[in-house]
Amino acid sequence: MTTTLSERVSQSAFDGSMLRVVLLMDLHEGAQQRFFEAYEQLRHDIAAVPGHISDQLCQSFENPSQWLITSEWESAPQYLAWVNSEHHAEQVRPLGACARAMRPLKYTVLRETGRGYDHAGRPGLARLQGAPRLGAGIVRHALTFTVKPGSEKTVAAILSSYASPAARVDDHTRLCRTSLFMHGNRVVRTVEVRGDLMAALRHVSEQPEVRAVEEAINPYLEQDRDLGDPESARMFFMRAALPAVHHVAADEADEADADDVRRHALFYPAKPGCGPALAKFLARQDEAAAHVQGGATVSSSIFQRDDIVVRLVDVRGPQGADLETAFGVHDPRKAGVLARLMAAPAGEAGKSGKAGKSGKSGKSATAGRPGEGPTLSAARHAMSPITDRRAPAER
């Protein structure tokens, strides 16, 4: 049976579906009234956020320390634009200070039943996801942060030298793969988990070897943090979160771990406000590549936060295969669209029509064939691999 393109896309923030967000919270003893008052202060601000439809604040009638906030959004990009903003981080700080544990869950809406969903007040742009998505049960997430210029080699050495934590988290959760890359002084760490992502991240953070590495890189971080202070650590990792917004696989279950499949990461800085559009553009490029029978692309994940976009691609081919073949945007019209969405590289701002070297070819990153307009090189966006660790096969 031929796999359709929709079946190959196991995750997407770009299909226009409504989003339901559930935030489970376990409060410190005696913090209930303080938490309620903090929510009252900011609920009207939340209601004014573009794309927000409604939310509910609920308290468990069995355990007064357990709370639930549910919210409904017209689409995932609108929610992500808010939740990943610095304004949101400051808004929720008073709420977070009341909680010993917080667990956010995000769902696209497939079906609705009940009189409340039929009223005329439903936003016209909100729509339901058409069909269930299929996948291999893998959850993907990433973190990104910057280190002080000049410390890149030291940080890379630290991040590549630690022992891997145990892959097994519990009976239902397993850490499958961790990949680290750098681009200049930016670090990106991607993780793949089978099961509960939050349980896996908590498991990794508690491992002595991982804690030692985190402490070792602290002096080199551009953003200060104190891992001994729960609030400081929570705010750092909230700001560092780089959510997966799209994943497509040609034949993920059978080929992702093959010996000839290589993992690459590419970093795309967007112009202010263009991050979602840039991520969507790259997602469509990789959907088309995954649809090519016998093509090189095995799978692609797009991560995006604000104006930071990272493209993680597993591609079939020998070590050192040409980046341009798999990742380059060669259609002049599409390359022009992508160029307009991207921020100018350092040192090139204001140099319209001029670009730096593209890597092996030595050609301009935006120079195309005569009469065809620009093409966009992938080599200038390639991140340097630091580690790529896969969990051993389950027995």
Image (spheres, rainbow, N blue to C red):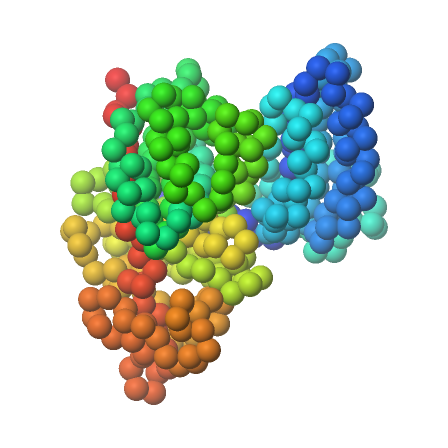
Looking at the image, residue 204 lies above or below residue 370: above
Residue 298 in view in this figure: no
**Where the C terminus falls, by quadrant?**
top left
Judging depth in this view, the residue of 148 and 236 nearest the camera is 148
**Count of number-bearing discs:** 0
Residue 275 in view in this figure: yes
Question: Going 71% across and 23% down the picture, which residue do you hit?
Answer: 67
Question: Going 65% across and 30% down the picture, which residue do you hit?
Answer: 96
Residue placed furthest toward the top:
62
Question: Going 45% across and 54% down the picture, which residue do you hit?
Answer: 309
Looking at the image, residue 8 lies above or below residue 32: below
**Residue 293 falls left or right of residue 199:** left
x, y percentage for residue 177? 33, 34
Judging depth in this view, the residue of 279 and 27 nearest the camera is 27
**Where the N terminus falls, by quadrant?**
top left
Question: Going 29% across and 36% down the picture, which residue do you hit?
Answer: 158
**Residue 97 falls left or right of residue 150:** right
x, y percentage for residue 295? 27, 55
**Residue 303 falls left or right of residue 360:** right
Judging depth in this view, the residue of 117 and 230 nearest the camera is 230
Figure quadrant of residue 34: top right
Figure quadrant of residue 88: top right
x, y percentage for residue 94? 70, 33
x, y percentage for residue 3? 38, 46
